[in-house]
Image: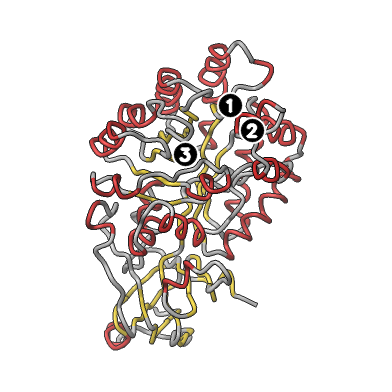
Amino acid sequence: MVTLVIEHLDALWTVAGPAPRAGARQSDFTFIPDGAVACDGPTIIATGTTADVRAAIASRPGRPAPRVIDGRGHSLVPGFVDGHTHVVFAGDRRDELRQRLGGASYADIAAAGGGILSTVRATRAASETELANRTRARLAEMLAAGTTTAEAKSGYGLDTETELRMLRVTAALGKSQPVELAATFMGAHEVPPEYRGRQADYVRLVIDEMIPAAAPLSEWCDVFCDRGFFTPDESIAILEAGKAAGMKPRIHADELAASGGPAVAARVGARSADHLVQITSDGIADLARAGTVATLLPIAAFYLKLGRFAPARALIAAGVPVAVATDVNPGGGFSPSMPFAMALGCFGSGLTFEEALAAATINGAYSLDRHDRIGSLEPGKQFDAVLIDGPAVNLLRANASPIAAVFKKGTLVHARQ
C-alpha cells in the first residue's frame, strides 16, 4: 500500500549507506533532481526521480489514495540524528554565559559553585514530573530544528536515585513525543560534593550500585574522561562494567586536554568518542584503528569559548567517520539546532556541506547503532525526513529557519506555522 508520496522535489538527498561514511566517502554523494519518495506507513518503499518512483508504485494498491505532497521549491534530507545530548535536566545556568563573556573560564565558573554541580543540585531537587515537562519543551525545540532521533544522557544526579529518575523520564518521553530517544547512563559525569577527596569510592559506587540499577533503563554507558574528571584507568573500569551489564560504551574524550580518551575508546570498543577538541595525532590513529565514530560538538566549543574546534579535516583524512551533535545542556550546549551544529562544523572544523550532512544523518545514526533503519532515505528504512525551503545548503543560514516540515515514521510531526 502507498500512504505518502512527496514528488517533484528540487533535490532529494538520500545520503545512502552503507554506514558509516568515512574518508572520501563522507562527501561522495549528491542529490537527485526532480526527486521523489514513496512510503507505506512508516517505511520507505521507493526513492528516485519522480518518474521512477511513480513507475515503481504504479502497481501497488492505493486505497485510500495516498497523500501526495508537491515538493517543488524544496529539498528533502534524512531526519537529523543528534547523537550527544544532556537534554534531561533542571535549573538554569544562562548566567554562566555572561560570566564567560566577561572572561571567566570553565574552571573559574566551577570553582565558584557553577558548572555541572550547579545543575546537579537543581536536578536532585526536581520531581519526575518537573523534569519531564522541562525536557519535553526542549525536545519540541529540537524537533522544530529537524531532529528526529536523539541520545539522552543521565549524569546530573550523581546519586543512584536521581540517575534512575532521569532515565525513567527519558523512557517515558520516548513513548509520549515524536523524537526517538536513545538512553545513556552517565553517572561518571563528575564527582559529587559528598565524594570530594574520595574519587575512588565514587567510582566503586558507580560500578557496584549505579550500573546494575541503571542497566535495565539504558542502552549506552558514558564517562567524562578528561583532565579534572575521570582518568583513563577509571574510565576503562566503568565502561567495562557497563558492558558486562549489557550497556554499550561511548565516551567524552579530549575536550579540555589530551587525556587519553581516544585510547580508552579503542580499548573498550566504544562506538563513539565525543568532543575531541584537543585530540592528538596518536588519538586520531587510535580512533581510526578501532573504527570509532568521532562525534564533534562544535556548539559546545563555541559557547564555552574553547578557542578551537575539533580537527575534522585530520579525522576525515585518517578515515575516521565523523558525526556532529548539539550537546544540548544547561552550561554550554545552548542551541537545540542540528543545522547550527552543521554550520559550526563547516566553518569551525572545516567540514564540507556534504560531510556535515552525512555527519548529521547517517553517521549520527551509526554512532547510536540505528543505521539499519534511520539516517538515510532508502527503501526499507523508516521515513524520518526534513523538508527544506530551497536548496539544502540553506540549512547553514543563521538568520532564518528554512525547515518547512519534519516527518517521523512516515507521519508529519512538525510544520512551520
Q: Secondary structure at mark 3?
A: loop
Compared with 199, 264 (above or below) is below
Residue at mark 2: 116
Amino acid type of the residue tagged 3 in the rendering: Glu
Residue at mark 1: 190
Residue 219: numbered disc: 3
Q: Residue 212 or 263: which is nearer the viewer? A: 263
Residues under labels 2 and 3: Cα distance?
23 Å
Q: Residue 199 or 209: which is nearer the viewer? A: 199
In this view, the residue farthest toward the front is: 103
Compared with 268, 296 (above or below) is below
Residue 71 located left or right of residue 289:
right
Q: What is the tally of numbered marks visible in this picture?
A: 3
- Residue at (40% x, 68% y) in the render: 43
Q: Secondary structure at mark 2?
A: helix
- Residue at (29% x, 88% y) in the render: 51
Residues under labels 1 and 2: Cα distance?
7 Å
Mark toward the start of the polypeptide (1 vs 3) = 1
